[in-house]
Image (cartoon, helix red, strand yellow):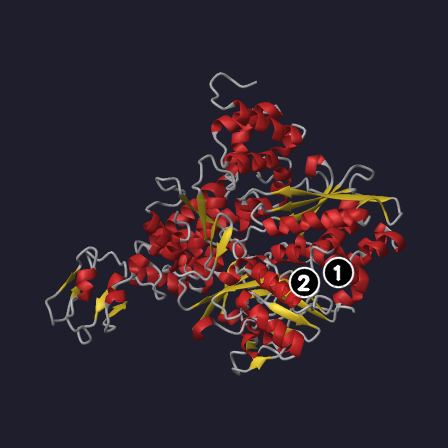
Amino acid sequence: MAVKMHILVCGGTGCSASASHEIVAELNKELVAHDLTDFAKVVVTGCFGFCERGPIVKIIPDNTFYTRVKPSDAKEIIEEHIIKGRKVQRLLYVAPDTNQSVPDSKHMEFYKKQLRIALRNCGFIDPENIEESIARDGYAALAKCLTEMTPEQVIAEIKKSGLRGRGGAGFPTGLKWEIASKSRPGEQKYVVCNADEGDPGAFMDRSLLEGDPHSILEAMAICGYCIGASKGLIYIRAEYPLAIHRLQVAIQQAEEYGLLGKDIFGTGFDFEIELRYGAGAFVCGEETALIHSMEGKRGEPTFKPPFPAQSGYLGKPTNVNNVETYANIPVIINKGADWFASIGTEKSKGTKVFALAGKINNVGLIEVPMGITLREIIYEIGGGIKGGKKFKAVQTGGPSGGCLTEKHLDTPIDYDSLVAAGSMMGSGGMIVMDEDDCMVAIAKFYLGFTVDESCGKCTPCRVGNRRLLEILTKITDGKGTMEDLEQLKNLSAVIKDTALCGLGQTSPNPVLSTISNFWDEYVEHVVDKKCRAGQCKALKKYVIDPAKCKGCTACARACPVSAISGTVKNPHVINQLDCIKCGTCIEKCKFGAISIQ
Amino acid sequence: MVGPKIKITEDSYLKIKEICESFNNNPGELINVLHQTQSHFGYLPEEVQQVVADCLGIPVGRVYGVVSFYSFFTMKPKGKYAISVCLGTACYVKGAEKILDALKSELKISEGGVTEDGKFSLDVLRCVGACGLAPVMTINGKTYGRLVPEHVKEILAEYAE
């Protein structure tokens, strides 16, 4: 008897961290106990995207979507759903707006506006089984390229599709390949996949590699065919052990099936792929730094030109693309450039994967057509702001990007409109912030990151960013002046103009975008010595409302620095000079008499 | 050759030599060599770097340059249980600093420190990619998510001996 039902369990990093492997073990145990192993099969897949409610278990063919599943739920899922065909109501996703449980994933708001091209196989296939990939057209595009198309035709197709690099800057992929193909013909060349996802709050590449590694391998081979390279290298963060494991398995399987290695499809084309590990340096996302790191050196960027296409890894012509860029290639070949170009906006074609995180109801991995608005992403897919709080800003592009605000919510998202709005596409991190987040502190947070990660090679980035951070710290400590704000602007402009690499040049963006969108907040910190979000500790003022204070002395006894004075049954007072703003008194007060001003 | 100042056991020396040889003593593989060496020794002290440099035939300055450049490599031994608190943006906006503060006061060490008994070490890292579970910390690679400061005590208790 053929297997009729598939029980998909998310085995991505997020759900694994919530013990999804124990769910798999329990499900398998129950299947064996009920002698159902011929009828239903448990499949460990990549990320479904809906990380907020993980661990996720999905039943195929009916698309039932169970959320926050525990190992102890396995028995009920098997006995009720698999045997009796009755959905386990208590595990279904409940739509927050209607309070109704949703029977299957097709009816979930989270998925309605999404269009999954790069993520087409994530959450559908077992990434450690090449046959499941092949069953969903894996390696069909490579076969088509090798047997029916010339490298020039493939490049022409990619150019026509309008695909732009998904790593951040948005350089046209077809053009990049064409330059690499024409560079020093006949020499050894290299195809590199940039999987050094260092942007904090972004996990697109990791999910793609964990959920569908074969698509990346296939696309790299196609690129190798186009530019005349027989070697591919994947530069991946050592912090992603699961993605590394799945890639190793995938490479081995592809070699066994003759889809990588010598004489692929009997066409005489050779292509092999090796892994290279990063070691925790954000700057290695920059392609020249990445290449130096792969050569076993410090990952410091160098001036371009020469571009990697002219002189890259070991001085040979090298083509570097990001994981998500590669993930789009096989689909473009299979479905055609015209189909791909029909999606998106005039200058930004196709879709973009975003890692939606922060103060939003539906944290997760999403893929949307270019041209969708931030409002649709945040309020429809994302389900709005957590706890009914007020939306304040959304940060895109990580430490190189900027904060967008209320007035940008209806801007269609593409490479150019985001830059025009003062941010950038970046690799796809999208962090939502609410009224409780202080924008000065956020700028300081990103600068802290940049200062830590600056490779130190050029002075504007090494010293300039440190000065920016000092000024921001001065402001959040309540010691800032209006001159400091001017200084922030001037210094940012200088760093932007003079830093060596893309990272240095974009490092002041979080400061510039928060200054332009939240100028009032900066002024408040400097002039009124006030932080409206209550995040900047030094600007917090704890006060006791004499009308509410019962004089119970609980706060005075708890205060670690004895800053609260008063007598029993009489209102107490906090001595502001002694107060260290630890917040202990607020926790102790049973009458809600203490507030932060 | 092992220089006269280098204090390292014969076994350790042979192990490093073996790792370097598995990469054909190719200086281009330095980062991979260091990954394996660190996973064997737990950290990369000066002596170990000297041996790696000798085996690969490069100046020790270049090895040190790489070790000090990448945050993954460490010259100090970690605790038996290495705690890393994620300070990625998603965790930051969800209060990761409070988790870090709770750990600091519970363990009485600061970032980069190791407890006196060598049991715990505390570090921060930038994004484990489990943003759906923010704020997150890992202990020897095991991920703990959706944390509040009150969880810290319970979690540390799991590692009581």
Amino acid type, mark 1: Glu
The chain carrying label 2 is: A
Labels 2 & 1 near each other (Cβ < 8 A): yes
A309 over A92 or under it: above or below: above
Q: Is residue B127 left or right of residue A7?
A: left
B112 over A122 or under it: above or below: above
Mark 1 secondary-structure assignment? helix
Picture residue at 61% right of the left edge, 42% below the top: A277
Picture residue at 52% right of the left edge, 81% below the top: A97
Residue A296 occupies quadrant: top right
A236 over A387 or under it: above or below: above
The quarter of the rendered structure image containing the N terminus of chain A is: bottom right
Picture residue at 62% right of the left edge, 55% below the top: A205
Q: Mark 1 points at which residue?
A: A132
Q: Which of marks 2 and 1 is in front?
A: 2
The quarter of the rendered structure image containing the C terminus of chain A is: bottom left
Amino acid type, mark 2: Val
Q: Name the residue under label 2.
A: A43
User: Observer-nearest residue: A447 or A140?
Assistant: A140
Residue at the far top in the pictured view = B4
Separation of residues labelled 2 and 1 (CA atoms): 10 Å
The answer to whether residue A427 is visible is yes
The answer to whether residue A414 is visible is no
Q: Is residue B8 left or right of residue B21?
A: left
Q: Do labels 2 and 1 share a chain?
A: yes
The chain carrying label 1 is: A
Residue A395, percent across and down? 51, 62
Residue A222, percent across and down? 79, 51
Mark 2 secondary-structure assignment? strand
